[in-house]
Image: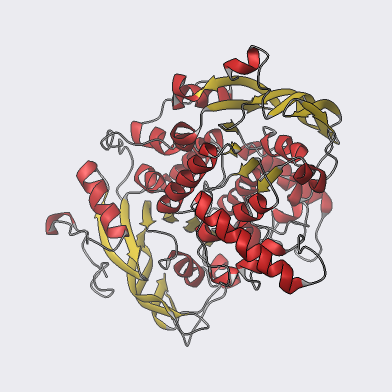
């Protein structure tokens, strides 16, 4: 709280008192109090399902609280809709952007606030306002660009401009960096600091403690629907916040794994992880000379070669948009290779002999997609239905001919218990779960299949500290059981925490590969430069794995 507030001077921008909200049997918020000082950046953290998104959704008018009071600038207000929130000067940037891809930036900013039936006049006024806002807050973006053609970071700028154009003095950002690269995240934080200097109050919902420490003035911690702590950011540590979030001391992990879980810098590379497991065995999946172009003829994969070995995690690092997503699509059977060869056991997959996702599952390959909403779940289906997607002909779903609701519920309940999915409600629609709990159910479904090969994209995107710890443990356990794992992540810390080897993609090519038995700050810097296309990792010949005679070198 601002000292002036305690002295009876300027009231806080936001004061929530006794906020409670229940959804059926689930108590999402319980008697929550929160004060946010005017012109500050205030973080709200907590595990997935802790009630963070519900709380800010009440503030933005998506939900109406069952009990409690909302004050804006010292005045008690009733916020029963998003329109009412906007009228109070509250704006929100959602985790999944609310933009029309085929519209221009200008059209998206105007949408819902056209300024009358004469669109030409409204467009001219909006264009002038965009220019003023862009200059004032460092939010430069081409108003005539089609939103679908913009990078994710620029699309987020459009969302912020939409809110500011509607007069937002209080801006809520829900997991704003979940789809951003590190560079885009840094630029976003510069924008947030600029907004703060101009007097805008910002509520930042995130699970990444590095971000809390980097950009907030104050942080509040939620756990199981309750507000459990408030801290001045300068007076706390990531470790303390992690313990407050999960209600216990974070399990004693090797330093590098703790770094990835907390989302803080390694401080020089940390201590190498202990390796108390068998050495990796033969190649489970081999890729040679893979090439693929998109519908516009743009090359997305060029001469990609790699080997996945049993009992080993190969981490694929790179700035988003350099071919990682397309590689996962081709390897999982969603897209067909246009050149090159994929080998799984005796099965050769190429342009003339493609394999779809169902055949690849039969060959022992499981896939956790990067975008769970587009590829991993059906939001309108129940959790128990999502728990067998792709495996609906197996025993978990019934007798193979008809789905058995009882079998589905029993199977899903067991997965929920093992993977701590909250709430433990197999009959709840998937849209009713937080993003982190959706992710845990997708992982549970694929890991339960006991795959020989696991392709996993962004495994902890939008996931809290406790769930990160658990998910990392499950991935390592699967590796130790002999599974060959390809891990794709834009979080370099996550790759350094889990992978046995790292390969880096740039412009659709694998530009280097390295073992991770030990890595120092210089190695990390070299990997970062290579991700940016500036340098290429060159591993000493003695450290390189031997190539199989028939497959050729694993390096591109």
Q: Is residue 544 above or below residue 196?
A: below
Residue 17 image position (x, y, % from top left)? 76, 22
Quadrant housing the N terminus = top right
Position of 3 compared to 74: left or right?
left
**Residue under the image location 78 percent in, 44 percent down:** 87
Residue 443 image position (x, y, % from top left)? 58, 50
Q: Is residue 378 above or below residue 265?
A: below
Residue 542 image position (x, y, % from top left)? 13, 56
Closer to us: 290 or 307: 290
From where the camera sits, is residue 332 visible? yes
| Residue that extends furthest to the bottom in the rendered view of this protein | 352
**Residue under the image location 37 percent in, 48 percent down:** 492
From where the camera sits, is residue 280 visible? no
- Within the image, what quadrant is residue 319 found in? bottom left
Position of 273 compared to 114: left or right?
left
Q: Is residue 372 above or below residue 421?
A: below
Residue 525 image position (x, y, % from top left)? 25, 48
Report the label total.
0
Quadrant housing the C terminus = bottom left
**Residue under the image location 52 percent in, 48 percent down:** 177
Closer to us: 19 or 511: 19
Closer to us: 70 or 303: 70
**Residue under the image location 45 percent in, 24 percent down:** 239
């Amino acid at each position: 709280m601002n000292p002036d507030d305690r002295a009876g001077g300027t009231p806080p921008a936001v004061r929530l008192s006794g906020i409670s909200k229940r959804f059926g049997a689930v108590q999402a918020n319980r008697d929550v109090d929160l004060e946010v000082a005017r012109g500050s950046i205030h973080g709200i953290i907590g595990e997935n399902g802790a009630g963070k998104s519900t709380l800010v959704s009440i503030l933005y008018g998506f939900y109406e609280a069952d009990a409690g009071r909302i004050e804006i600038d010292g005045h008690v207000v009733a916020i029963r809709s998003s329109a009412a929130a906007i009228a109070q000067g509250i704006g929100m940037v959602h985790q999944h952007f609310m933009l029309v891809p085929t519209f221009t930036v200008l059209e998206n900013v105007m949408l819902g606030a056209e300024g009358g039936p004469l669109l030409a006049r409204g467009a001219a006024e909006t264009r002038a306002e965009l220019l003023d806002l862009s200059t004032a807050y460092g939010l430069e973006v081409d108003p005539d660009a089609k939103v679908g053609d913009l990078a994710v970071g620029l699309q987020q700028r459009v969302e912020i401009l939409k809110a500011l154009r509607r007069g937002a003095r209080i801006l809520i950002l829900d997991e704003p960096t979940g789809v951003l690269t590190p560079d885009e995240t840094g630029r976003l934080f510069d924008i947030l600091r600029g907004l703060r200097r101009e007097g805008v109050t910002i509520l930042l919902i995130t699970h990444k403690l590095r971000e809390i420490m980097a950009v907030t003035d104050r942080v509040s911690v939620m756990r199981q629907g309750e507000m459990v702590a408030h801290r001045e950011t300068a007076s706390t540590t990531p470790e303390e916040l992690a313990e407050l979030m999960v209600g216990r001391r974070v399990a004693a992990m090797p330093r590098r794994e703790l770094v990835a879980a907390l989302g803080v810098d390694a401080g020089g590379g940390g201590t190498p992880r202990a390796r108390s497991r068998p050495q990796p065995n033969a190649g489970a999946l081999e890729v040679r000379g893979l090439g693929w172009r998109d519908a516009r003829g743009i090359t997305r994969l060029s001469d990609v070669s790699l080997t996945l070995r049993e009992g080993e995690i190969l981490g694929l690092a790179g700035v988003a948009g350099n071919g990682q997503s397309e590689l996962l699509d081709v390897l999982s059977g969603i897209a067909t290779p246009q050149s090159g060869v994929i080998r799984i056991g005796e099965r050769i997959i190429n342009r003339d002999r493609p394999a779809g996702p169902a055949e690849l599952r039969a060959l022992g390959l499981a896939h956790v997609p990067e975008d769970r909403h587009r590829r991993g779940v059906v939001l309108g289906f129940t959790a128990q239905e999502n728990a067998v997607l792709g495996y609906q002909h197996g025993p978990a779903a019934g007798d193979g001919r008809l789905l058995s609701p009882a079998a589905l519920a029993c199977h899903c309940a067991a997965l929920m218990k093992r993977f701590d999915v909250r709430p433990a409600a197999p009959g709840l629609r998937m849209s009713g779960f937080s993003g982190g709990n959706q992710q845990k159910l997708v992982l549970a479904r694929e890991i339960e299949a006991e795959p020989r090969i696991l392709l996993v994209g962004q495994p902890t995107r939008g996931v809290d500290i406790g769930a990160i710890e658990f998910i990392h443990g499950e991935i390592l356990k699967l590796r130790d059981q002999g599974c060959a794992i390809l891990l794709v992540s834009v979080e370099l810390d996550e790759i350094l925490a889990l992978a046995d080897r790292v390969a880096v993609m740039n412009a659709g090519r694998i530009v280097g590969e390295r073992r991770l038995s030990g890595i120092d700050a210089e190695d990390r810097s070299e990997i970062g430069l290579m991700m940016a296309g500036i340098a290429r990792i060159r591993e000493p010949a003695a450290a390189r794995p031997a190539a199989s005679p028939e497959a050729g070198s694993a390096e591109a």
